Image (spheres, coloured by chain):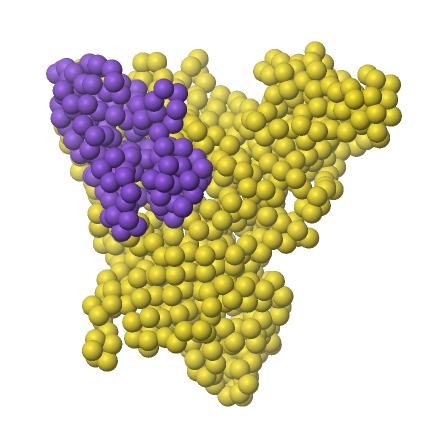
Chain colours: A purple, B yellow
Amino acid sequence: MPTVKLLVNGSERRAETAAGESLLSLLRNRLGLTGTKYGCGEGECGACTVLINGKPLRSCMAPAEFGAGKKIVTIEGLAGGGKLHPVQQAFLEEDAFQCAYCTSGMIMSAAALLAATPNPTEDEIISHMNGNICRCGTYPRIMAAIRRAAQGGKKS
Amino acid sequence: MRKIDISEAEQHAVEPLHHVFEVNRREIFKLLGAGLVVGFTTRSLPAQESGRAQGQRIPADLESWLHIAGDGKVTVFTGKVEMGQNIRTSLTQHVAEELRAPVSSITLVMGDTDLVPFDMGTFGSRSTPQMGPQLRHAAATAREMLVEMAAQRWHADRGKLTAQNGAVTDPQTGQSISYGELTAGQKLVKMIGGNPELASPKEWKIAGTSLHKVDGRAFVTGAHQYTSDISRPGMLFAKVLRPSSFNAALASFAANGADKLPGVTLVHDGDFIGAAAPDTETAEKALSLVKTQWNAPHQTSEAELFDYLRKNPVTDAGGFGGRAGQESGSVETAMVSSAKTLAQTYTVAYIQHAPLEPRAAVAEWDNGKLTVWTGTQRPFAVKDQLAEAFHLAPEKVRVIVPDTGSAYGGKHTGECAVEAARLARAAGKPVKLEWTREEEFTWAYFRPAGVIDAKGATAADGTLVAWEFHNYNSGPAAIETPYNVANKRIAFHPAKNPPLRQGSYRGLAATANFFARESFMDELAHQAGMDPLAFRLKNIADPRLRAAFETAAQKFGWGKQQPSPDRGFGIAGGFEKGGYVATAAEVAIDKSGQVKIVRVAEAFDCGAVVNPDGLRNQISGSIVQGIGGALFEAIHFQNGQVLNPHFGNYRVPRFRDLPRIEVELIDRKDVTPMGAGETPLLALAPAVAGAIFSATGMRLRSLPLAPGPLTLKKQNQS
């Protein structure tokens, strides 16, 4: 089995992988980082979104080796110094979830959006987030949470 | 008049089973430490049973219970499960309210069959009206016991003591003692029964207020473990080989070396073939080697669906057949003598729940006892399914339901649990099985498709005088009309061997019946030359339904804007599961015929509101989910195959489909709270159909209404 070396959430990690294994499987099943979710395995729902060198990536579509040598951030590594990331905090404030299975992917996608576009327009939020599915239909709250995070935690 | 008497439970195809709750008093205290236990059963208990029992067993029909420990921690046990409907939070509010204890001191243990009392399942919007009062009653009883204990300790008049914030206080002396101190070292059990009488919602302080999801932090940090996140020592990963089509039988099987792969356990048992291995890829590789042949019958395809459903009724009296009718007056006489008559047919497609967390299970055998973690709405039914599959005594099976990645009625069954358990037994190690999205789309069950024939007549003044309504296959939920009509005939006709495996879906057939009924009301209004809202209000008797329509209309600004070829307005409503809903929708239609719902206003009344913000979340979410079934969701299938088992070809609502949503809660403090997870979804589709008609003059009578662009008439394209 090939071994892949990754930098995940600030720590160097090594894991053996099977042929054809996805980065999602490596994170979840080899490294125990189960906050990143499987939703479709086809890049259609966004539940598996992680940040690779700051950019959002559907980890179900990437082979495990793709992560080698890159800086990976998962939902578990988003908070820093005991403080939630502003997007995480905003999701709490807005109750921007129901079953919350999509939440990790939503937060990672939103964090990537705000890192690149700190004050996005409504259309920019929609077009950036459109690849993330919430079957409970909490999109209006997720939009409100993203606006809140963009405005330093204040309700828009 | 004969009533439609198919109960909610029957529609969910629930087999009621009796369980003996085996935890006795000593075991409870072993489990949770000393303290106070209050149990609740709906049966009335004799007086001697309801006192402080010494060594008695917990009654078998116990429905919920709570424990207060020496450190003040409150643990509540209920068979309900959390799957996004936020019942963990709202039930916590109920307990906090009556116990007068901080929300943070209360933990709910849910859906663990070894720890919680039997529960039929979490469906049918029953948690709030049933479990809510039970827990309130148990909490209120515990509070009174605690006050009594403090009174005895202080030799004080209990009437002068107050309970607040997890402590009993004597306002005269200022002394205070926490619940934990009162119960520390004690082993007290009290069983209560009957119908609880509780404080009016008007006096609520914690219930009735908005409270964030109690464990929200675990979800935004990724810490919460859904079933698929659970890991056990030595656990293997599994895959199942699916048949070539629905109803296919295995004709031949050859392992072809799959069982020789290192670390692989291959199981071939009847028609079941699966593999467990140290990783999913190896399990997949093993199954790719297996050679199989399947025999499949020819099966009804989508093109023949509605014809099939109408022409193949169940004829025996079992199941739903033969007793699903309601009749009063004479429809025939009224039709003949009426000013205007109309007949129309409506259809609804098969759709999938598509919960974002596909079915998953982790199974582990230990000394003949099977433990399975799985996301299901019916943990005790899955326990029975496992006991049956493996010929086990009930106490040899434990099902644990972690808070689940949604269900919407789609997770009543335990096939994934059975599959994981079968492989775990063969492997002698814990096994995790996660269904793929394609498996979830194909091998879970579907919301029934249906055909609905409606006939009606109005008098010259717009009074509804005749109503005939036949639902083929989709179901009897909300099949009755909430409008006044003297002459009516309403019947449900279940179909024999429907082409797809069908089952419960959020709201059951109420979505189909609302769609047909409200669309037909729109058509009758048009024929009578009346405004759709005015026609409904003229024929409504129930003041709560009237209030819902008027509230939604006002919020929406009904009648203020005239429809145009690119902009239309519709309204619909009704009553179901104790909730009254009215929904107004505005659609925009572009030159290419694309339909977008741009604005929705909904009024909802489910009695006294327990958590206003949580309720708004449910209502808004229902509307968003309803967009899919209204506009574009449909399962395509041919000869036993699902043709679109992916999010890439089964379209679900996304950010881009979002309308502006306005929700108006009608908070009836004088009415017992009812559930809200289903009814808010029901009126969207007919409101949208009405809006499309008002813009284009096109009557769309099939759900989904607009899976692609509409074919517009010439004048709309100019």
Q: Residue at x 53, y 36 (%)?
A: B89
Q: Residue at x 30, y 31 (%)?
A: A37
Image spot of residue A132 (x, y percent):
28, 42
In the image, A22: left or right of B455? left
The answer to whether residue A84 is above or below residue B311 is above
Q: Quadrant of residue B436?
A: top left
Q: Residue at x 23, y 62 (%)?
A: B708
- Image quarter hosting the C terminus of chain B: bottom left
Image spot of residue B291 (x, y percent):
15, 32
- Image quarter hosting the N terminus of chain B: bottom right
Q: Quadrant of residue B358?
A: top left
The answer to whether residue B708 is above or below residue B258 is below
In the image, B650: left or right of B137? left
> Looking at this rendering, what residue extends furthest in the top direction?
B185
In the image, B380: left or right of B147? left
Q: Quadrant of residue B16?
A: top right
Nearest the eye: B395 or B623:
B623
Image spot of residue B507 (x, y percent):
47, 52
Nearest the eye: A22 or B309:
A22
Q: Residue at x 24, y 30 (%)?
A: A50
